[in-house]
Amino acid sequence: MREIEFDDIVKAVRDIIVHCGTDLPQDTYDALKEAMEKEKSPVSKEVIRQILENADIAKEEKRPLCQDTGLAVFFVKVGEDVKVKGGLLKDAINKGTEQGYKDAYLRASTCEPFSRANLKDTVGYNLPAIIHFDLVEGDKIDIEYAAKGGGSENVSRAKVFPPAAGKEGIINYVKEVISDAGGNPCPPITVGVGIGGTFEKAVISSKHALFRDIGSKNPDPELDEMEQTILEEINKLGIGAMGMGGTKTALAVHIEANPCHIASLPVSVNVQCHSSRHTHITI
Amino acid sequence: MAQYTLTTPLTSEDTKKLKAGDTVLLNGVIYTARDAAHKRLVELIEKGEELPFDIKGSVIYFVGPTPPKPGDPIGSAGPTTSYRMDSYSPTMLKHGSKGMIGKGKRSQEVKDACIKYDGIYFGATGGAGALLGKKITSAEVIAYPELGPEAVRKITVKDFPVTVINDTYGNDLYEMGRKEYEVK
Ligand code: SF4
């Protein structure tokens, strides 16, 4: 049994939060650059230019990329041969989150659902983090992290279709969700699509799909083809960067599919804005 | 699509020359407010009480900035989604405010109020918080400090880049732009 110190996890989590707050990941930066070159609308081209300039300034001067520094979302795979010494893994992740958000001057954006009171003085600074755990083989802890802003989360949707809806039904649904969203989720966006499983499994899959690097290929050829088809369809909508009209509404579509019940076809669409702050570490 | 440099407070003469798609570099004092602050401001107007700033010709920026780093006037400060202000904006325009800065589409009521009261809805690049924060040269909380990032701030901007989304003639850049690039 391998032992990992509680404080080492706190520090690792704190560090990735600080880093992601100001440094746009390379996959996203490269995809935006390519989109700027290919964009036909001059207005949208200028918007993407500003987004890239913003990323340069943020990195250089260590300023938050966006004022919405999001809720902290984690997918954590815990090896069955690891033990955290000195506390609970969940507490270490939350503590690291709080420290990272404070140290990097990120905004505390969590609030109580009804009074809308900010939880920073009661629960903690931008806490609780949203953590999805999974148990796996081995003696390591694998942490995927993303800062998820509200604008793109607000346009995300899920629906359980009858099986007869099929691929066509799914493609049309994704198009409808993105069309209705327009410029609100800060395009150019990445679209996570979760298919199958139960209702919640589809939703979590659509979130996890956003953690994949832009430009990476889906290992399943059928899903890969579907990703390309949906991406083309979305870019025909004409929404453009920040909704100002253009040909590069989405940078990528990522799909995760699961086996589902014979009676149902759950589909979830989770949208990620251009400020796709995500990273991955193994401890 | 024309380019302008304008200084606040804005007049009807300023706003009437703008068309959807024009780009503007804004200078001068503007005020920040999100939903919670708008609710309070509109309540004051309805009660006939005095506002914490002069609404005539004012430009309101929908933003909740990050905390400033030591020595900076403000942190990152990009626009938030504007529809949450849709129910309040017509009242603000009616009482003399001339501009709003945010992101995302507005309701028909807001667009109609822009026509009626010579108001402009500007879009700023969402997610460009570091870039836009640097265009703010001073910031001061002037009301509702208890709202934290949502407090009303008086900020001074220098060459703050915005695009006209809704003009005083009923044009909407989101609709126009999309129509132009949509492939049926
Ligand atoms: S949608 Fe993304 S880029 Fe836009 S304001 Fe929210 S976090 Fe920032």
Image (cartoon, coloured by chain):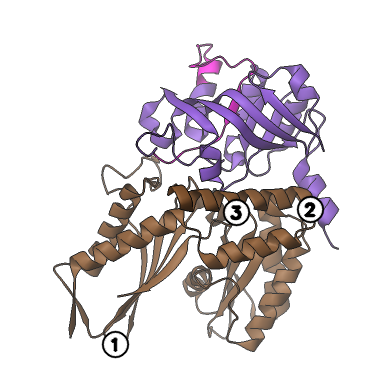
Chain colours: A brown, B purple
Confirm or reject: label 2 Cβ below 8 Å from ligand 1.
Answer: no
- Residue A67 image offset from top left, x and y in percent: 48, 45
Dot 2 or dot 3, earlier in sequence: 2
The amino acid sitting under disc 1 is: Gly
Q: To which quarter of the image does residue A136 belong?
A: bottom left
Q: Chain of mark 1?
A: A
Q: Chain of mark 3?
A: A
- Residue B66 image offset from top left, x and y in percent: 43, 41
Find out whether the residues at labels 2 and 3 contact each other: C-beta distance under 8 Å: no
Answer yes or no: is residue A165 visible. no
Residue count near mark 3 (Cα–Cα under 10 Å), binned few <14, some 14–19, many ≥20: many
> Horizontal placement of A221 versus A110: left or right?
right
Which residue is outermost to the left? A86
Nearer the observer, A262 or B131:
B131
Q: Tag on residue A41?
A: 2
**Magenta-colored span:** B43-67
Q: Main secondary structure of the magenta part?
A: loop
Q: Which residue is mark 1?
A: A138
> Horizontal placement of A90 versus B14: left or right?
left
Q: Is residue B61 magenta?
A: yes
Dot 2 or dot 1, earlier in sequence: 2
Q: Quadrant of the N terminus of chain A?
A: bottom left
Cα distance in 3D space between marks 2 and 1? 50 Å
Q: Quadrant of the C terminus of chain A?
A: bottom left
The amino acid sitting under disc 3 is: Leu
Q: Residue at x 61, y 40 (%)?
A: B83
As drawn, A143 above or below B112: below
Q: Is residue B99 magenta?
A: no
Q: Residue at x 68, y 67 (%)?
A: A173
